[in-house]
């Protein structure tokens, strides 16, 4: 049992995945109708911080499923630099916010409605907040709500919704419901993460992921910063060779989020970094990687990458004597 | 005088800007014809490492000038995840590579030609390398060629070309040629950067920039890593509030690349970080900022942000006893 909120929220997330899956399945036909009738030729996913990183993954998944240009843009860029983002196209906006009350997200939605009168899908953990008023369709991951400042189960359950949205809108079948037995996998990741959570052994952490996993690498980077005040960064694996690898030494921990179909190109980067002295931990559904995401066989989803990443940040924080519930300098929602 | 290549290359960059300006002006009518006849409805800018960051800035500038969706995508993503990037649209590809020989860039261009038979513009410091063979139009910043591993004047001169490309293609007039007197500004930035180059005073550096300046913030981050092996990261200013600011303490140096039209929103972030103990240095053409980019009045360009950022990395490296010409673990070109 965990004495802090963050540990309880990470540990209990399979229920939140199930709730999110059920909610997006319920909305599937509405999402498909909206997409078919809307004839959008551009989709923008937007959020702030963690939910911007979620937007990155969601945009990749959506473009792959629907074949329409889908981009992730931070809310502040929509507000400050609209001419660098919006064009003549008919755009669908997907806003993501745990609280449904983040000032920049609400303002971005409001301006989008005023300027383009087009549709907005809201992904949140609530359905009665200021952001929800702008939604054509609200997708609420209620069981993902959190007391903690750092997003964990809220992120993973909103990710489940974003995956479902991509499939539902494009008329693809949703995968089956998550089984409750997956909680044992989440617990097992706590044990695996402990092996790499020594704050004296590793001075900096790099998270490498490509495609839809790049957004998760960014989210893992932010978790590590917020909870454990550790130098952490995210890069695309092959990009890491183009300069950032200058930072690699024997106090470097590299977490490789690998895709099955890009394994060969990516494991070459991992092996190169091992040769430079880094400790490398690889995750995928493939039995060749250090951490094997067994849950993916029962229910395909990139959400299975998250528990290890969340526990790693959490356990490093605990090992440093920090309280994961109380990140330095931060509040739960940014209200301006 | 500088005894190393990097110092000489940073110091001499105004000549490279002039050369790049002249080259893009010469190509302006060809670029406009290509753009008008091509009827592209999507533009992808791509590169690796520094040139991916250049692609980010270039995509923003191009979309603002031409009003067509323009995205920056690392070459490796085009190779590994084409379905997350390419759609049904008619796409113009702009590849950026200092050497014209980077394996991933050449492969991305080759596959694009094979799969889409559409046009490619190559921005490079050469015009006789493997990448150039795929170009409909080659833009070569020859005076930007370098001996150093870390890109400095090559980056800035290719940036001048990307700015010119955006204006020329969209039928806007190019600004005037850069004056040789701007070299005095580059030298002045050496003096200003010295004030913040004490490696004992600052343990980590954050570069904050929005819009087209975000790519420059990323490039500054990479320069700081490569040359001085210092923890450095780039964020959009308002994104920095959503988690990363947990890392801020009195050993933190924050470099704010500010836009004139977003000053109010961004200076609020800077002031908040000052209150948390960070040393904050702001740059813009505005007299209110710490570093005033006077060159922008003579010849508008975001290139004026670069000399201070390059000198800061260079001087911190020198102060740490490192050789800026020899970044750890790196080669000049990544050939796979």
Image (cartoon, coloured by chain):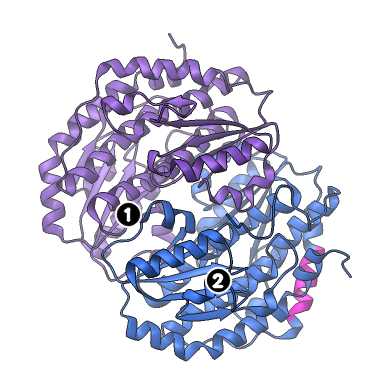
Chain colours: A blue, B purple
Foreground residue, B200 or A301?
A: B200
| Disc 1 crowd, CA 10 A, few/some/many (<14, 14-19, 20+) | some
Looking at this view, name the residue that lies furthest to the top. B1
Q: Residue at x 28, y 32 (%)?
A: B300
Q: Chain of mark 2?
A: A
Q: Residue at x 39, y 50 (%)?
A: B104
Can you say whether B121 is above or below A182 in the image?
above
Element type where label 2 sits in the image: helix
Q: Residues within 10 Å of mark 2 (few under 14, many from 20)?
A: some
Q: Position of residue B278 (x, y in %)?
A: 65, 34
Residue A41 picture quarter: bottom left
Nearer the observer, A71 or A267: A71
Seen from the viewer's position, the closer of residues A163 and A124 is A124
Instruction: Give x and y (percent) for residue B58.
Output: 33, 45
Q: In the figure, is residue A175 to the left or right of A117?
A: right
- Residue A187 in the magenta stretch? The answer is yes
Q: Is residue A117 above or below residue B260?
A: below
Q: Nearer the viewer, residue A281 or A303?
A: A303
Quadrant showing the C terminus of chain A: bottom right
- Where, quadrant-wise, is the N terminus of chain A in this rendering? bottom right
Using residue B193 as the reference point, say whether residue B48 is left or right of it: left
Subunit bearing disc 1: A
Q: Earlier in the sequence, mark 2 or mark 1?
A: 1
Q: Please provide the residue range marked out in magenta.
A: A182-191
**Is residue B200 on the magenta stretch?**
no
Q: Position of residue A43 (x, y in %)?
A: 39, 69
Measuring from the top left, give residue A90's x and y in whole percent. Answer: 30, 71
Q: Is there one chain holding both mark 2 and mark 1?
A: yes
Which disc, if any, is residue A130?
Answer: 2
Q: Is residue A260 visible?
A: no
Q: What number is the disc on residue A83?
A: 1
SS for dot 1: helix
């Amino acid at each position: 049992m965990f004495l802090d909120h963050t540990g309880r929220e990470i540990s209990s997330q399979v229920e939140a995945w199930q709730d999110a899956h059920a909610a997006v399945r319920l909305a599937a036909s509405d999402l498909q109708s909206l997409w078919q009738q809307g004839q959008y030729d551009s989709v923008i996913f937007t959020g702030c911080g963690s939910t911007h990183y979620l937007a990155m993954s969601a945009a990749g998944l959506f473009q792959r499923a629907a074949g329409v240009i889908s981009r992730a843009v931070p809310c502040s860029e929509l507000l400050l630099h609209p001419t660098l983002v919006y064009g003549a196209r008919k755009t669908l906006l997907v806003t993501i916010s745990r609280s449904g009350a983040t000032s920049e997200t609400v303002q971005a939605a409001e301006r989008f409605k005023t300027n383009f009168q087009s549709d907005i899908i809201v992904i949140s953990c609530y359905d009665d907040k200021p952001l929800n008023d702008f939604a054509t369709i609200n997708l609420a991951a209620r069981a993902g709500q959190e007391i903690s400042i750092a997003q964990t189960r809220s992120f993973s359950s909103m990710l489940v919704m974003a995956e479902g949205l991509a499939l539902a809108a494009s008329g693809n079948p949703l995968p089956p419901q998550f089984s409750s037995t997956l909680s044992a996998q989440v617990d097992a990741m706590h044990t695996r993460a402990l092996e790499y959570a020594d704050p004296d052994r590793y001075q900096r952490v790099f998270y490498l992921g490509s495609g839809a996993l790049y957004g998760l690498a960014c989210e893992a980077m932010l978790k590590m910063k917020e909870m454990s005040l550790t130098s952490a960064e995210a890069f695309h694996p092959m990009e890491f060779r183009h300069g950032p690898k200058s930072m690699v030494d024997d106090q470097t921990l590299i977490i490789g989020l690998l895709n099955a179909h890009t394994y060969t190109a990516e494991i070459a980067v991992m092996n190169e970094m091992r040769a430079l002295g880094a400790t490398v931990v690889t995750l995928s559904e493939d039995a060749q990687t250090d951490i094997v995401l067994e849950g993916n066989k029962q229910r395909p989803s990139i959400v299975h990458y998250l528990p290890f990443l969340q526990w790693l940040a959490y356990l490093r924080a605990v090992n440093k004597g920090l309280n994961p519930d109380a990140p330095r300098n931060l509040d739960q929602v940014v209200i301006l």
